[in-house]
Image (cartoon, grey):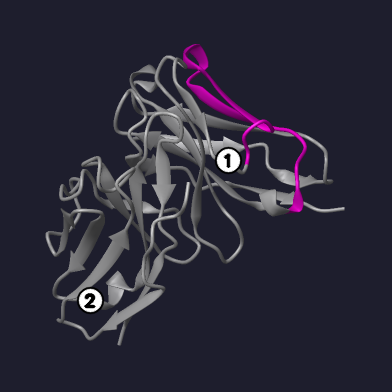
């Protein structure tokens, strides 16, 4: 059974940093691209960042470019999102999502339950 | 990186069919056969319903179907059931630098 378990969310002040983690199991992690997708309270889904199977291709939404860094550790079956210079508008539930392809194809077949990030003073 | 355009809401009665449109551009929906659709019930994670425009994952009802014409993709749900009431999002591949763009979401109400 595929499982994606996010962690690391919480309440953080504007301008501070936070690191999210996603622990994957139930599939061959290094065969697939992975992504972070967020959903602000009461709003729609927004793709944040994606990384190919071997970290050779990485992409970011314009809204987080230069502030967020995605990475993965295939030996630990884990995906990460380092979030710096956080803003109030980054407040959202952050989902980890598995792609159906090794290179990012934006086909998300499995999702975690999300970790909530709240940016507020 | 403009979001794909979906109607904010659609509704239908049990047993009827509804279609949700998803309009993009020649840089995303129109260029790739990589449109997917997601169902999201309140408080739940999204669920993949359609991928590569018209394919259904194992376990998804054949009442759900997808299609594409030019820059517009569509999700059709036939034989509406109460359990179909949810938010639906389309997503398209948009190139290697920013691979994914979502639609704004459509709230489906089963009357």
Quarter occupied by the N terminus of chain A? top left
| Image coordinates for residue B9, horizontal then vertical, percent | 38, 76
Is any part of residue B78 visible from this angle?
yes
Q: Residue at x 70, y 53 (%)?
A: A89
Q: Is residue A91 left or right of residue B36?
A: right
User: From which residue to which does the magenta span run?
Assistant: A64-88
Give the letter of the chain under mark 1.
A
Q: Residue at x 45, y 53 (%)?
A: B45
Is B89 or A117 nearer to us in this picture? B89
Q: Position of residue A26 (x, y in %)?
A: 36, 28
Judged from the image, the secondary structure of the residue bearing numbered disc 2 is: loop
Magenta-span inclusion, residue B27: no
Based on the picture, tell me whether residue A87 belongs to the magenta stretch: yes
* Left or right of A76 on screen, residue B49: left
**Residue B14 location, x and y as percent?**
20, 83
Q: Which residue is mark 1?
A: A62
Most extreme residue toward the front, as rendered?
A: B26
Give the label on residue A7, or none: none
Q: Residues within 10 Å of mark 2 (few under 14, many from 20)?
A: some
Q: Is residue B90 above or below residue B31?
A: below
Q: Which residue, given by chain and number where applicable, does mark 2 sit on?
A: B81
Q: Alpha carbon of mark 2 to alpha carbon of mark 1: how far?
A: 38 Å
Q: Chain of mark 2?
A: B
- Towards the viewer: B7 or A95: B7
Considering only vertical position in the picture, is A13 above or below A52?
below
Residue at x 23%, y 46% (from the top left corner): B51
* A29 relative to A81, above or below: above
Of labels 2 and 1, the one closer to you? 1
Query: Of helix, strand and loop, which one carries label 1?
Result: loop
- Looking at this view, is A11 or B54 the one in front? B54
């Amino acid at each position: 059974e595929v499982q994606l378990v996010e962690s690391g969310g919480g309440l953080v002040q504007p301008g501070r940093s936070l690191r999210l983690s996603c622990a994957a199991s139930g599939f061959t992690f290094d065969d697939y691209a992975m992504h972070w997708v967020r959903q602000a309270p009461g709003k729609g889904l927004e793709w944040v960042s994606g990384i190919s199977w071997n970290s050779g291709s990485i992409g970011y939404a314009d809204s987080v470019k230069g502030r967020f860094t995605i990475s993965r550790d295939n030996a630990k079956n884990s995906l990460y999102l380092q979030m710096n210079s956080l803003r109030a508008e980054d407040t959202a539930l952050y989902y980890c999502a598995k792609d159906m392809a090794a290179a990012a194809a934006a086909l998300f077949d499995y999702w975690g339950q999300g970790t909530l990030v709240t940016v507020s003073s | 990186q403009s979001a794909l355009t979906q109607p904010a809401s659609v509704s239908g009665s049990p047993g009827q069919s509804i279609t949700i449109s998803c309009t993009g551009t020649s840089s995303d929906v129109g260029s790739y056969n990589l449109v997917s659709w997601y169902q999201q019930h309140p408080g739940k994670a999204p669920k993949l319903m359609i991928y590569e425009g018209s394919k259904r994952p194992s376990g998804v009802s054949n009442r759900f179907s997808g299609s594409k014409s030019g820059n517009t993709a569509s999700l059709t749900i036939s034989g509406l059931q109460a359990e179909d009431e949810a938010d639906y999002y389309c997503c398209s591949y948009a190139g290697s630098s920013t691979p994914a763009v979502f639609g704004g979401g459509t709230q489906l109400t089963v009357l």
